[in-house]
Each structure stands twice: as structure tokens, then as C-alpha cells.
Image: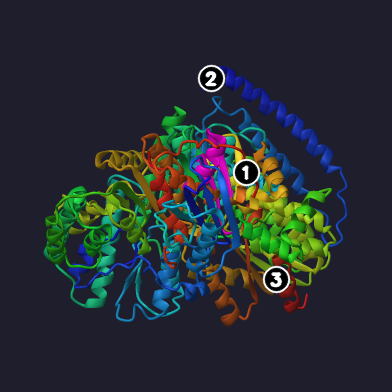
Amino acid sequence: MTVAAIGVDAGSTTLKVAALDAAGTLLWSRLEPASPRTAEQATALLAACASEAGPGKGAPIVATGYGRDLVLGAVRRVTEITCHARGVFAQVGGACTVLDLGGQDTKVLALGASGRVLDFAMNDRCAAGTGRFLEVTAARLGLSLEAFDAAATAAHHEAVISSTCTVFAESEMVSLLARGTPVEAIAAGLHRAMARRVAALARQVGIRPPILASGGVALSGSVRRALSRELDQDVGLPRHAQLLGAVGAALVGLDPSSPGPIRVAGRPRPV
Amino acid sequence: MTLYASVRHGLAVTGGRAVLGVVRWRDTFRRPRAHPHLAPPLRSGVRLKELIARHYLKGRTASSAVPVAWVTSGAPVEPLVALGYHVHYPENHGAICGIRRVAEDLCTAAESAGWSRDLCSYARTDLGVVLTGRTPVGRLPRPDLLVCCTNICQTVLGWYQVLAERFGVPMALVDTPFLYGTAPPHALTYVERQIEVLVEAAERAAGRTLDPGRLHAVTRRSKDACTLWREVVDRARHRPSPITAFDTFVHMAPIVEMRGEACTVDYYAALLEELDGRVARGEGALLEEQVRLAWDNLPIWPRMRWLSDRLAARGAALVASPYARAWGELADLIDPERPVASAARVYLHPILNLGIGQRLAALRALARDCQVDGVLLHSDRSCRPWSSGQADIRDRLVREDKIPALLLEADHSDPRAFSEAQASARIDAFLEGLGA
Amino acid sequence: MLPVHHPRALWRAHGYLPVEVWGPPGTDATPAGAHLQPFLCSIPRCGLAFHLAGGLRDVDVVVVPHACDALQGLGSILTDLPPRPLPALTPYLPRATGEVAVAFLAAEIATLSTRLAEGSQRGPTADDLLAAALDEEAADAAFRALLDARPRISLSNAAFYEAVRSREYLPPAEFRAVAEVALAATGPVDGIPVLLSGIVPEPAGLLACLDRHGVRVVADDTACVGRRRYAPGTSTEPFRRMAEALGSGPPDTTRGSPLSERVAYVVALAAQTGARAALLAIPGSCDPELFALPVLRQALEAAGVRTLHLETDLSMPFTAQADTRVEALLESLP
């Protein structure tokens, strides 16, 4: 199978590249922490893609994410909103709500039956409700993100954290620790606080089931559980959740006009 | 107004009064739990609870039985009371939601519908109530008329316009030009004309005509209650103070939402008598009063008890606030013989409609009268008109008056804008500085 | 001059050169933090910071019209506890409507005139004032013509707004000359037609972003521009005439116009100009706009106009995130 389109998602925290064949099957992908030199990093990853997945002659490169203007060789630049919508819609094929949980931004997209973005909302100003919130608070607890997720999962009860502001939540956390509250309960409380903020954003847009979470933060089971509880319905995890921006960009490359579903031939390779 | 609604309302009010009377009687004999740092609560509190409960109980069945108005806290309410309106105060209701800790949920409902988190939490709470129908007081009556007076902020204007749109009822506006200095004559005329228009709108919505005799009587009772309230807050001059600012925040409910009613006058007469008893016996609201503080701006409703306990534990008595004083200081301007013209002057002059120079002067007067050792200024995200200028006011108090002052970041209702850890660190450090 | 409505003719008649300050954008607002909390609107914070940095050195008097609680706070600080001395005038804008409001505003303008005359020894005569009012009305007519012609004018958004916003500082005759030049710039037009609402088309990156993405602002409902389409007054008494004109603009939240009137006006404006989307550029914590926002958005969406709320901060550059939002909106247009 040959590469028919390549998507590059130059996000705030990670840079992702995905190569699809003409049927929309994921052939090759790579994810790296974002370097400050976006252009060089993207070029290097595209070269890796060409050597590992085959040259893919004439395969269009579509760039998305904050660094989309810096990706050399891109024939199109599209926002990550459209790309996540395309990426999720290719799997769902109908109306749905996408929670794109990124490192610095959280976005909620409402997709119509034809895959069009009917409305979207993004977090304002602060890091509340984004990956950054979890990163900062986990670091304060001295936990890696995986351990933070595990701690929240293991919690028997949930500490009440009312602030969704990162700075305030941090100081609330300090006083909880000072009172001897178990780390697990605090971790669960923090996940809940973040979920509250995302849910508020989602309600602004209006929820159309099913709900799917994409972006790197969506990989955390505790986050999805907290979101499910807050939104009172299941929050699913699409395949390649963290890569969906890049996959969506490549889908735009395959078919720039239609947001319609791509027939996925065969099982995509696990990433 | 329908017969069925009127009969139901009559029964509910009479029955409710009886039940609440029994509850009060029972509570009178209850021995309150002893507090390690505070004197036993004021006995009048039992009656206060009854009055508030009665007010909201009346509201539950008021729709279609009596005319209903939703009004801002600084609105000229006397004509409405004289016309027999049941008057609902969304701001007071917002405070109740704050105290009962349901404000956050209601705010979230309003935010989900698109109203920004930057908007006043009273407004968000109220919009949340309107959207969801949830309230800790059971049920709110639907308004026949909205009365919006801008003498506390312009925020109420945007808020009440949304309510007018939502309920499809008329909104009477009393726009009170902000007084950077003294009130010019054209501002008084402007407000007076609008109050006349308000009376006409209220008559129309109620389907009855205002009786001048009743307006006179209601205005007289407003004046009497305001005068008594001024005396009540003024008792904080005594050492130890028989009353705390926290007490006044709670006991001010009737002067705001039952102004012009006979029970309010009686209530404050009784409260004053009780305070005078404490003064005579040399009893303070704190068991041990070491330092005396003043408070600027609205209270932090959801954390009031927390703050009260924290201060009391260190012997710090929060004795007074311009906020609670505001409802008493204009008593002399009220003239029952000229109810509309004097209302124009009164409702132009609440502290929130005055420049920050006047607010500084008010704090200075209060600090002098009540001999306070320090001032806590609540920088309230939700009350931006009151919060603007606080930094300069604090600076003048500290530099020119040598009164230590602390700016405390919070919100009057929304608990999410408050960090207990941050607040306690600041308050403790401040009190340590005062030697408490 | 701070936002929004003020009697231009009055300052001119008294021999002042009125220059409006909307922020100014790009000002480092940090120094204002000692006086105004960061949760307050960025327009008064930038204005104060600009003043503290000496930006108003050559200014004789600062005018802070009462447009909202935030400007009220700034006006009050400058009046009572100024961090740097500077005479301040603080006219109140009536939120009521009808004769009672016109009478109040006329009296308010008369009071301002008396204050200005105190400073300059020689005050203008009634004839001078009326002549100034008529001059401004002629410039207002050119301003309205320019806005009406926007769908046919081939200028970029940035160039168009530069022309239309020169009304904020140019004398009436000079503005009319600018307007004439802009009006002549008709030609083939393209771009996605949108309506711009909110307070002010700032920060500067906003218009550049729209130009970059091929957006064409065909209708303006910002407080700064579209809501100051004043009609001429009718009275021969100059203060009253100025008051009539100031109260004659389209519905405006800072004048307290009823929500239903404003929503109907904006929806109609979008329909008339064929706008496919509406951008609402609102400074953070702008109460007057934020209360109306959900109702306005709902009405526009119901009329088939996609909406995007952009929270702006005049002390900050236009962010990449805001740029993404605009682009995503365009990508999602049907």
C-alpha cells in the first residue's frame, strides 16, 4: 500500500505525523514532544515517514495545529478543529460531540450528521480544563501523569476541589495535603475539577451523543471516567485518540471538499 | 389575579404563619450550642428566621394571587409595597443560594447556557434559577413587573433586560446617574420623573391605583426602619461591640427585602433593645474582643461562617461595614410628606452610587466611630463597581490614616473564585501584624 | 476621550482637539494593576496605564464618559484619587429613553460647557455651539455614507477601518475628505461577508487576521463604529441638539437599549448585508455585552448566521488561539 496523504499536527505539546493510504488506512505515524524548532522537527519527521513508509509520490501534506504555518511542504493548512472533526467523523460516521483535550487547549466540537462542525468552543485565557492543569497539579503531588491517573483510579473517595483555576487548585491541594488527605483522593478531586470545566464548555456548545474524547489527555482513563460522571453519559475513546489531528489533516488531504466518512479498509495498524 | 390563586395564597400564608410561629416558639426555648469564641447568638435571630421564611413562603403562592415584582436591592420599593406587590429580590435570593452553597450549581447552569463566568455571580445564580427552576426556597413567583435601579451598578441593567426578554414582562428602569461629586439638580429631576413613570407602570401591571395615604404610611415605615437599622449598626461603637459585621449581614435581610412593612420596624426595635441589653451588661459579640476590624464590600456568603470562626478564634471582632451601614445612613433624607421627590434624592445617594472619594470618607468615618484597628477590603470579582478603587482606598488608609488594611480576593457567591489556603495565609499574617 | 458616546461638537466649540483613546491597544497594563484589579476590563486598565506612562502629558483634560461600571471606576479614580494629576470630566450617559433622557443629557452637556468655559475664560456663544454641532452632523452624514457603502468599497478591512476610525480624531472637514477618498475606492469586491460586533475592532491583529483569511467585514455593529451612526438633531438649542444626536444611534448596550431592539437590529443588519457569520469581539469582563451575548448569538444562529465570540484583551496581542477560532469558523461555514 502506498502513502496517499500525510497529516502533520504541530501542537503545543507534541508534534504528530500520520500517513494514510488512499482508503484512509493509517500506514505510519509518529509522535514526539514538540521542539521549539517546529519547522526542522516537522521536516525531520516527514523524512522519516518517507524512508519508513515509502515515498508516497505526490501525496499531499496537510498541516494543522499551532505550528501549521511552519510546516514546510504543506499544500494546505487547516485548523485542528476541522481536523479532529474529520478524524472522529471518519470513525463515527454521524452526529457526535468531540472533546479535544490538548496540552494547552481544550476544544469541544459539535458535529452534525454530515460531519460538519456546527459549533465549537475553546477554553479561555487560563489553563483550567486543559492538560496543563493536570500536568501542573500532578507535578505538585510529585507524580508522573501515569501515576496520577492510577492514583485517581485507586481513590476510595474524592476530595472536594472547588477551584478550577490552576493556581487556586494548587493552593487548595496544599491545604488538603496539610490536613492529611490521601493523595489518591486529591488526585480524584483534581480530575473531577478538570472534568467540571470541560463539561461546562461542552454544555455551552450543546451535547449530541455519542461523546468522544480525542487529544493526548483523552488517553487517561481517570479523565474519561470523570468526564462521563460529570456529563452523565459515556465518553468514548476513538482509535488513535492522540493522533486524530494528524489523521484528520491527512483525511483533508485525501478529500479536501467533503467532511464525509472515509471507508476504512482493513484494520488500522495499532499505534 | 385569579380567585383560586388568591384563596390558595391566603390559605398558604395563614397556615404558614401558624407553623412558622410554632417553630419560632420552639426555637425560643432551644439552648444554642456553645461556641468557643462567640457569645450565644442574638435571640432576635429566631424571629429573623421566621420573617425570612414567611417572606419566601408568601412568594411561593404569590403568582396570580397578588402582583409580583422582581426588583434590584436599591430600587425605590415603597410604591410597590403600597400597591400590594409581593416583592422578590434576586440579589438577596442569590445571597441565600451562596450561604446554602447551591450558587455554584446554579451559576454553572447559566454558564452552560452561554453567560460568561465574568458576570456577577448573583446574576448568574438568578439566571440559573430561571433556567432550571431550582431554588433552596422551594419556588419563586413569576414576575408581573421588573424594577431595575442602576444605583448599585450597571450590571443590573443587562441582567434585568435578559429577565424582561425571558419572562416577556415590562421592565421599569430607574436610572440614577453616578455621582462623581454632588448631585446636580437635573439628576434629581431625571430620577424623580422616572419614579413617576415607575408608579404608572406598577399601577398598570397591578391593575390598581396608588393610594397616596398608603404610600405615605409605607414611606414612614421605611424611614422608621432605616432609622432603627442605623442605630443597630451604630451599636458597634461600643467596646466590646455587641454586634459583629457578620451579624449585620444576616440581620440586614428585612431592611432590604421587607422595607416599608410594619413587621420590619417592630423587628429592628426588638433587635435594638436586645443589643442595648448587651451594651448595658458589657457583653460583646465575641467572648474576648482583642482587635476590631472593619469590612469593605459585600460579604463572602459561602465562607462567612468560616471567616467568622477564623477571626473570632484570634479575638478579632469584625465590627462594621459600609455595606451594612448603607441601608441606614439615608434615613434622614426620607420624607413621607414628599414620598416621590424625597425618594429621588434617597435612591440617588446609596454609597455604591458615590465616587470613591466618598467611599474612602465613609470608611474613615466608620473606622473612627467604631475605633477599628484594621480594615479588610474584599476585592469582589463579582461586584466590580465596589471593587474598583479599593487599591487606592487601601493605599490612603495605610499611608495617610496609618490603619492597616488588607485586600482579600474572593467573590460574594461563587466559591470557585476563592482559595481558602491563600485567604487564610493572608488573614493570619494580617492579624499577626495587628498583634492578635 | 474615553469610550463611547460624547458630544464632539462641544469640545470643538470650546477650542479643544478631541482625541479618542480606546485602550490604547498594546499598552502594557501592568502599571495600572496598582489601581485597578486585573479582573476589570482592559480598556480602562490600558487607559490608566497609558496615563501613568506619561501618554497624556500634553492633554489638558481627560473625558471619561460613563459607559459602564469599569469606566465609572476609572473616572472616579481620576476625579477623586488621581495617581497623576489631570483634570477629568465625567459626563453621565442616560440609560432611560425618551424626553426625560434628552432633557437630562442636554443639561449634562450644558454643565460640561460651563466647566470648560471656566478653564478657557471665553466660552463659545450659542451660535458657535450650533455651528459646531452642524459641522459634526455633516461629518456624521459622511460617516454613515461610508458605512453604508462598505459592501461596495474595495478596501481591505484594515484600510477601511483606518478611514472610518479617523472620525475619532480628525476635525469634521478633514474627516469628510478622508471619507470621500474611501468612498471613491469602489471596485470588484470579494471575500466571505461577515458582521463585526462587540466594542472595538482591536487588538490590531484582529483586522489583519480577517484580511489574511479572506474575510470581508460588510456590516459593523461595534460600539466604536457602527453604534455611533448618529442622526442629526432637530432642536435649535445647541445642547439639546447635541443630546438628540447622541441618543439617536442604533441600539447600544452602553446606552442601555432594550435587548429585544438590539437583537432585532443586529439580525436585520446581518440580513441586509448578506453577512454569513458574525464575529463578536468583546473585551473580557465587559458586562454590557456579555449579558446580551447568549441571546444575540441564539437569534443570529436561528437566522442562519454563524457566530463566533472572541474574547479580546487590549493589553495583549491578538492570540494564535483567536486566529485558529476565526479560521475554524470559516472552515465550518456551510
Q: Give how far across and how far down residue C132 sits, in percent.
A: 15, 63
Q: Is residue B189 above or below residue B316?
A: above
Decide if residue A265 is on the left or right side of residue C218: right
- On whether disc 3 and disc 1 are found on a single subunit, the reply is no
Whether labels 3 and 2 share one chain? yes
> Mark 2 = which residue?
B2
Can you tell which mark lies on residue A42?
A: none
Q: Nearer the viewer, residue A257 or B269?
A: A257
Instruction: Kindly identify the residue that appears in the image at 42 percent across and 70 percent down.
Output: C46
- Residue range in magenta is A81-110
- Quadrant in which residue B51 is drawn: top right
- The amino acid on which the numbered mark 1 sits, given as a three-letter code, is Arg
Q: From mark 3 to mark 2, how far is it between C-alphas? A: 56 Å
Disc 3 marks a residue whose amino acid type is Arg
Q: Nearer the viewer, mark 3 or mark 2?
A: 3
- Is residue A96 on the magenta stretch? yes
Q: Residue at x 17, y 58 (%)?
A: C238
Crowding around mark 3 (Cα neighbors within 10 Å: few <14, some 14 to 19, many 20+) is some
- Number of residue marks: 3
- CB within 8 Å, label 3 to label 1: no
Percent position of residue A201, x then y: 56, 47
Front tag of 2 and 1: 1
Judging from the image, mark 2 belongs to the subunit labelled: B
Q: Which mark is residue A239?
A: 1
**Along the horizontal axis of the image, is A14 left or right of C128?**
right
